[in-house]
Amino acid sequence: MTLHRVHYKKMLWPVVIGLLIWFTAPLRPVGLSLIAWHMLAIFVATIIGCITQPLPIGGVAIIMLTLAALLGVIPVDDAIDGFGDSTVWMIAMAYFLSRGFVNTGLGRRVALIFVRLFGKKTLGLAYSLIGVDLVTSPATPSNTARAGGIVFPIIESLAGAYGSTPKDGTERKVGSFLIYSAFHGNIATSGLFMTAMAPNLIAVALAKSMHVQITWMGWFLAGSVPGLICLVCVPYLIYKMYPPEVKDTPNARAWADGELAKMGKLSLPEKLMGAIFLLALVLWMLSSFIGLDATLVAFLAVSLLLFTGVLSLQDILHETGAWNTLLWFSILILMAGKLNSLGFIPWLSQSIGHSLHGVHWSIVLLVLLLVYFYAHYLFAGATAHVSAMYGAFLGVAISAGAPPMLAALLLGFDGAIFSSTTHYANGPSSIMFGPGYVTQRDWWRMDFVLGLFYLVVWGGIGSLWMKVIGLW
């Protein structure tokens, strides 16, 4: 046996910056506890380690969690509890559902049908996948469920049909483009409908506590123009920034017909997979109305796949992408939650409010939107971010004189678009990033560019549109 390679030089930046923050604790702002400052040091060092990657992300996360526990920043019991987050398990279940699509061949059959219908252009395939997300998003209040349980399995099958996989370095044929386009389509649909993701509902509840009543139709009307602009323009922008190697497939329809003929009629495993998938889809759509947790629905679907023999326990144990994501994403969510519970995030919100006192409301609102957006680098999930900062920022905006409905909706939309920051920004990002179709460098680089586009469209054009329809 030989030792596995560790890039020790790449540890330099996370160690130096982490120690710098740690030992400047005596200079920390008044009102911020020592343990909160130390948590910030460890979290920043972890994020930088995830960027430089002296080890794979999972390895970095384990080492930093161990260090946090040894230094007394995170109790060991809390560290273990961090692996029980429902969003993370939803992601893992989505991977297992995807394995069912692959094993039975149903995913390949669906992919071939998509190729037959939309296969002339790779760009057309991207729009068709986003269309699936758009149709299901109003009634599916979990963008993780849509991305992982509905869209991701189809993408994997489509990429496989074109011989595009990161395992042999062919991901740029079509897989990378489809994965990244579908992720950003998910961002647009998440902002377009109030019921498209849980953090939107949290924002509405927090706004209501400040006497700002946002209706379902009001949210949709406000988000319709910026949302549709993004749905139409963003896939094309990605197509230009990150073009697939395979752009035209003139013989795709004939090829797909031939492959479907070879597959023959639906087999029993395919029928079972399809029935269980449709059941999960219906329950996800109804979950907000019948009080059924979206993660429980995912567990139910996987349990049925095991019970019917569509999946085996070995299939689940060998799904390394699921376990890897569960590992590192759980740790990042835990650390981000600690930043909030230890008081760093509330302190940051209050400090911004005090520093903007007396400034015109339009400038205040702009600064709040930018800080709220880019603060998501400190969060591994939208729910925690919205819960921690939305109410405080809305209160600052209203006290500065901003129109309450405008501020509430713009901050609400920000809760969707700030997922265009990192590969750990939310459940869909970790699902789409996990298989390795898009490198971390490319993900962050393109996210930064598209993030600016979102801020202009949702913040600028969105504000003008809301003025036109009389919302402020």
Image: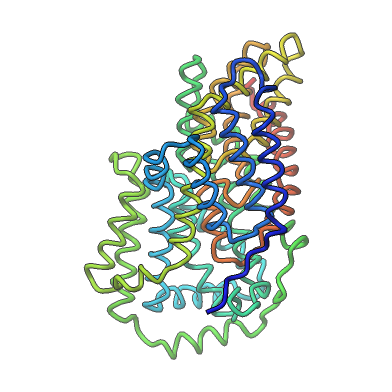
| Residue depicted at x 56% and y 51% | 186
| Residue depicted at x 64% and y 41% | 44
Percent x, y for residue 66? 49, 47
Q: Nearer the viewer, residue 139 or 83?
A: 83
The figure's colour scheme reads rainbow
| Residue depicted at x 58% and y 46% | 425
Q: Quadrant of the C terminus?
A: top right
The answer to whether residue 23 is seen in the rendering is yes
The answer to whether residue 397 is seen in the rendering is no
| Residue depicted at x 49% and y 57% | 325
Instruction: Name, please, the residue furthest toward the top.
Output: 358
Q: Is residue 310 left or right of residue 264?
A: left
Q: Nearer the viewer, residue 57 or 221?
A: 57
Instruction: Name, please, the residue furthest toward the left.
Output: 307
Q: Is residue 412 left or right of residue 92?
A: right
Percent x, y for residue 464? 72, 29
Q: Nearer the viewer, residue 11 or 301?
A: 11
Percent x, y for residue 242? 74, 63
The image quarter containing residue 419 is top right
Percent x, y for residue 103? 38, 77
Tally of numbered discs? 0
